[in-house]
Amino acid sequence: MIPTESRRDLPIMLWCHPRSVSSAFERAFIQRDKEFHCLHEPFIDAYYHGPDRASDRHHESLSSPATDQENNSPQPSYQDVTEQIMSSYWLDPTVGDIVDKETSGAHKLRVFVKDMAFYGILKAPDEQGEVEARFPLHRVINTFLIRDPRKSVVSFYKASLNEETNWGYFDPKEMGYQDLRTLFDYVTTRLKQPAIVVDADELCSDPGNIMKAFCECVDVRFEESMIHWEPTKVKQFERWKGWHDVVENSSGLGQVEATPMPDLREYPEIVLETINQSLPHYNYLKQFSIQSKIKVSSS
């Protein structure tokens, strides 16, 4: 269970899969930079390059497997990222920046994290079939974002082959629908946390009501700035060229990725297979979506 006495101070984790409109969702909280410290996929380097890396993909474009080329420091471990998320951050108005310790006049920021469930958050089952987490999921509010795989898989396939992203190739394992479902079951069954699921298409179709409902679930006051903004470059997205152009050029959640269903006949068999493998997990999670709860409460 989530400790209720300090719930409003707990980090908010948005677990998702690629191309789920997650960066647009994240931008809703980036807009409120005087209240939230947003971390954009902090587990990615631990998963791909860290000392306990869980991926067999090698990205020369990002950095070497062992070190961060920019400062020649070791890549973070899962423990390093955990400490980053669970740390305290203050906004110091005298310098207009975030500091790691309380100063006169500074106020504490709540942490919001957007990350992928497939980044090895849960360890492989042991001999008894028990699953353990690499991250203290019981100390945060866990939420989930999903999108119809007929849209997200196609989008990820195209982005993976885009020269600007320099991702190299499409790997079905990185869609992560099964990982997201497993993490959801762990959080709701083992930790007894409430199911907080947002469907991306429902969010884009009705951003005001869906975001308001989400805010209620995580003890956040809703503001219109979370669904309307000005097109601009976003600092958190600077490293990832080609991945976030749509959300940076948008003016609100209603304009982001409100795309029609693609013609699947245009794509190779590996895309169709990945969609078919992902659909059961998507449909399972969709039954818990905030929109479905809104419909039930209003009927």
Image: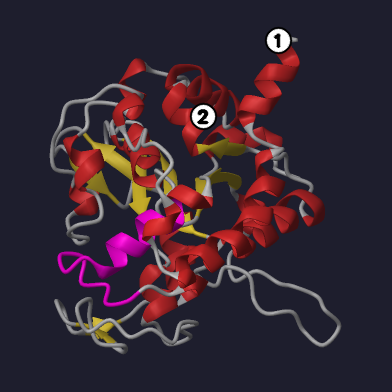
Q: Is residue 158 found inside the magenta-colored segment of the image?
A: yes
Residue drawn at the location 15% of the way across and 34% of the way down = 94
Residue drawn at the location 30% of the way across and 28% of the way down = 255
Give the amino acid at mark 1. Ser
Element under disc 2: helix
Q: Is residue 118 above or below residue 24?
A: below
Q: Is residue 217 above or below residue 192?
A: above
Q: Is residue 163 above or below residue 289?
A: below
- Residue pointed to by mark 1: 298
Question: In this view of the protein, which residue sits in the foreground, 152 or 49?
Answer: 152
x then y, percent, for residue 102: 33, 44
x then y, percent, for residue 113: 43, 49
x then y, percent, for residue 222: 45, 19
x then y, percent, for residue 254: 35, 25
Q: Is residue 54 left or right of residue 228?
A: right
Q: Of callouts 2 and 1, which one flags the residue occurring earlier in the amino acid sequence?
A: 2
Residue 202's disc is 2
Magenta residues span 152-169
Q: Residues within 10 Å of mark 1 (few under 14, many from 20)?
A: few
Question: In this view of the protein, which residue sits in the foreground, 183 or 140?
Answer: 183
CA distance separating discs 2 and 1: 16 Å
Occupied quadrant, residue 193: top right
Question: In this view of the protein, which residue sits in the foreground, 77 or 242?
Answer: 242
Residue drawn at the location 49% of the way across and 69% of the way down = 119
- Quadrant including the C terminus: top right
Residue occupying the far right of the picture: 128
Residue occupying the far top of the picture: 299
Q: Is residue 13 found inside the magenta-colored segment of the image?
A: no
- Quadrant including the N terminus: top right
Q: Residues within 10 Å of mark 2 (few under 14, many from 20)?
A: some
